[in-house]
Amino acid sequence: MTTRASHYTSPNQIDAPQRRTRSWNSLGTIIAWVVIAVILLITFFPFLWVIRTALTNSDAIFSNTSSLFPVDPTISNFERVLGLVDPASVVSQGGANVSAGVLDFWLYLRNTIIVAGSITIGQCLFSAMAAYAFARFHFPFRDRLFVIYLTGLMVPGIVLFIPNFVVVRQLGWIGTFQGIIAPSFLMTPFAIFFMRQFFLGLNTELEEAALLDGATKFGVFWRIALPLMRGPLLTLAVLTFIGSWNDYLWPLLVGRDESVRVLTVALGIFRQQTPQGAPDWSGLMAGAGVAIVPTLILFVFFGRRVVDSVQFSGFK
Amino acid sequence: MTTAKVLSVSKSNSKTSLQSRFANNEKLLGIAFILPSLIGFSVFFALPAIRSLFISFTEWNLLSPATYVGLSNYQTLFADERFWRSLGTTFAYVSWNIPLQTVLAIFIAVMMERIQNSSFLRGLIVLPWLLPNVVVALLWLWMLDPTLGIINVGLKAIGLPPQPFLGSPDQAIPSIALINIWRHAGYTAILVFVGLKTIPKSLYEAAQIDGASAWKQFWSITLPLLRPVLVFVLVTSLIGSFQIFDTVAIAERNAGPAGSTRVIIYYIYQQVFERGINMGLATAASVVLFLILISVTLFQLRFLRAGQSDLADYS
């Protein structure tokens, strides 16, 4: 756990070209490709289905269940969800099974960005600072404190949620952004552990040279170590952002109010509002579709980093 | 440590202004750097964990002051048939979820390893894990819809009877398990894949010379040497699995059908938000869950001999 460079380099070593002379011949490889193709199909079919349903006219949802492509294609569901048209007018035009519930998408999007953005910035900065102190500075109780932090990794969320709910309530922060953000703003044990491993893997020569040149220790952290950690920091930021973007239970506990409602909570409420027998599937899928657009964008740009970080966590 | 030597040098050079002394004092700076995280840890991790225990010994509805009631919450809990049922439901979910997911992940990982340069593939396969639980639950709720869902349309097309899935007490928990397997299998496969890469290739070459079949190689080399990674995978995914909530909350109404999906977290949630605020009972249940998780983890670590590596046997 405390060895130096090994964690830093291992994700790269994994991709080193390997010469493998196993008895499995090309037949084995063909089977592997077929299996992988099936897995990918199962992985991606639901995405196709979200798009297909979201583009299907809500009147046609019930009549044409087997078409693989949008039936009577329309973007009206997206318009409805994004508030570009008044859902009441759609209902009055005889649109059956259209939920009158409005998903005030732009508001919830703004709220989610505020929440996920603040958590990401705070958590990455403060965790990086703490991680740097754990990796480089000597101060009382350093190692003991680190071990205590690590035990925090094992406490299940629900044990913390209820007392945290009480704390947030006592602070008067129910229904506020502070309330949603606070518990993960200053640290998570994982973030500190993650950054510490990378700081430990960083060669100290540059930092020592800067100190000899008269830089302060703080300056060394801020102008040398942190910029060198751009990559891991970015990875942590992407993971933290996606994680807080996806969070449901905590924002559900403290942030139901319209003004701070995040997308996941809004989708949950939208789902509760749809009629029991005949939910507004096309509307729901349009909502689900737009809710994952930011994730997909991040994934396109940083997917590689996410995979590396997953591989990193396998090594800890 | 070399930094210590450098420190003494730079100390003598440094200006004596207060600001620069602070920026160079390792102890002060260390504490300053730790402070935000320490506040966060104390207020939102350590104290709440301890406080949970205290709250579980009180009767408290948040409106009037808490009163100490000793073990009465635990007695109420253990006498509550719904609590036991929710534990049973959670165990049922975990035993559908974890074995299938782990086996599938190992299978996917072995297949991925057969394919040269599968890094792009690993990127694709992790995608479901990045989606919000809420969205995953919604899209499967739609696909598994008893009458209109594409899965039943597909079943009918190949001549099988349509299934109620999330709508029946018998199938709801397995369906929710399948949904989460879809979300997590790729992620778990990548973890296993990392483990596969650590197995020395020379072992397979030696086994090949001895004429061992691929199947035999898998059982006597791959699986035993994968154990450290599998322990990690099992411990973390079990802890997550026991805390299933989001999917149930979205895919089912009021833990239906007929309360058949009231998992333990849902039970706790209801104690606080739906059945009159009962903080004592809710935290007591969460403490019990915590104890279960610790025991399961310790049992796994012991049973799977996490600390030892089989690799030593081969060297």
Image: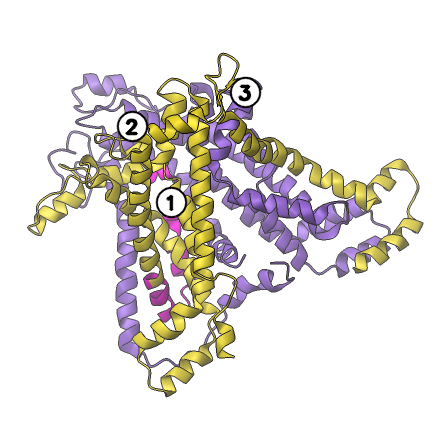
**Of helix, strand and loop, which mostly describes the magenta segment?**
helix
Is residue B276 positioned above or below B252 on the image?
above
Residue numbers of the magenta segment = B107-136
Q: CA distance from mark 1 to mark 3?
A: 30 Å
User: Which tint is chain B?
Assistant: yellow
Is residue B22 positioned above or below A134 on the image?
above
Residue, x 18% and y 27% (percent of image)?
Answer: A278
Lower sequence index among marks 3 and 2 = 3
The residue beneath circle 1 is B241
Residue, x 41% and y 54% (percent of image)?
Answer: B234
Q: Is B88 placed left or right of B297 in the picture?
A: left
The residue beneath circle 2 is A271
The answer to which quarter of the image holds residue A125 is top right
Please determine if labels 1 and 3 lie on a single subunit: no
Is residue A165 positioned above or below A191 on the image?
above
In the structure shown, which secondary structural element does the residue marked by tag 1 occupy? helix
Within the magenta stretch, is there residue B116? yes
